[in-house]
Image (spheres, helix red, strand yellow):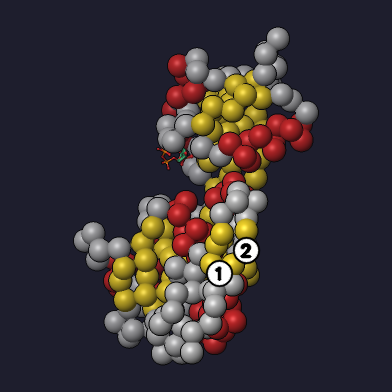
Amino acid sequence: MSRPAKSRVTARGSVRGTTPAAGVTGASAPLRVAVPKGRVLRSLVERFARAHVDPAVLLNDDRTLVRDTRDGRYRFSLLKPDDVPTHVEYGAADVGIAGRDVLAERGYDLYAPLDLGIGRCRMVVAALGSESLVPPRGRPIRVATKYPAIAERHFAKRGWPVEIVFLQGSVELGPLTGLTDVIVDLVETGTTLRDNGLVELDEVMQVSSVVVVNRSSLKLRRGAVQALLDALA
Ligand code: PRP
């Protein structure tokens, strides 16, 4: 029997179905897991292996985006890290692995029960070779970032007016080319800041990867979701 999809109107005005698509909720269907491509994948593969979730298909060197484990228990979709929470919130995946940075930037209606402690890094404010930021006279501080909402909130807490300049990548270029006064960006090893003569001025937040779960899947696939959470814990 098919149920009407629950939906809600978000602050941004869109209507989101929160019930997973029909035909994928049976107890024997694979649990759909949204996995981020990129830096975190290697640590995640190790974590899955320790949890007896066969990660072999994640290591295949091809361009397929949906991959089932050999035992048929899990169906991975490989996504840009920023897109993982969207897929899970809309019910296109039951579970996903998402960074706290992405979750904090946009705000999603998701259950986030487990921090995996991988993908650890920090979000910081940095500038060229000065250890204290002197706000420029007569204009707001210009901030280059991939995280406009987080940056805006951070400077609002400090009571400093800012002009946010949204960039897609290589944010460190902002102060180097004179585009901005500072950056708000992720630091993992510190190499990128150092190599570009930038100095950390302030910490914005600590980042790590967490497991996020679709609210309907939590009820409809409770057994499989809980088994995965227990194995990963
Ligand atoms: C991230 C981040 C920094 C860099 C920090 O960029 O935005 O630029 O990593 O890492 P580090 O402290 O270990 O040097 P990414 O490599 O994802 O590329 P991007 O700049 O194109 O976004």
Of residues 187 and 90, the one drawn nearer to the viewer in this rendering: 90
Instruction: State how far apart marks 1 and 2 are (Cα).
Output: 8 Å
Up the image or down, 222 lies above or below 140; here it is: below
Residue extending farthest top: 137
| Tag 1–tag 2 contact (CB < 8 Å) | yes
The image position of residue 200, as x and y in percent, is 60, 31
Question: Tag 2, which secondary structure?
Answer: strand
Q: Amino acid at mark 2?
A: Arg
Compared across the picture, whether 180 is left or right of 81 comes to right
**Which residue is depicted at the point 44% across and 88% down?**
26
Q: Which of label 1 and label 2 is nearer to you?
A: 2
The residue identified by callout 2 is: 8
The image position of residue 71, as x and y in percent, is 32, 85
Q: Amino acid at mark 1?
A: Thr
Compared across the picture, whether 66 is left or right of 226 comes to left
**Which residue is depicted at the point 54% across and 78% down?**
4
Q: Which quadrant of the view contains residue 137?
A: top right
The residue identified by callout 1 is: 18
Up the image or down, 41 lies above or below 49; here it is: above
Up the image or down, 49 lies above or below 183; here it is: below
For ligand 1, the image quadrant comes to: top left
The image position of residue 150, as x and y in percent, is 63, 41
Disc 2 CB within 8 Å of nearest ligand 1 atom: no
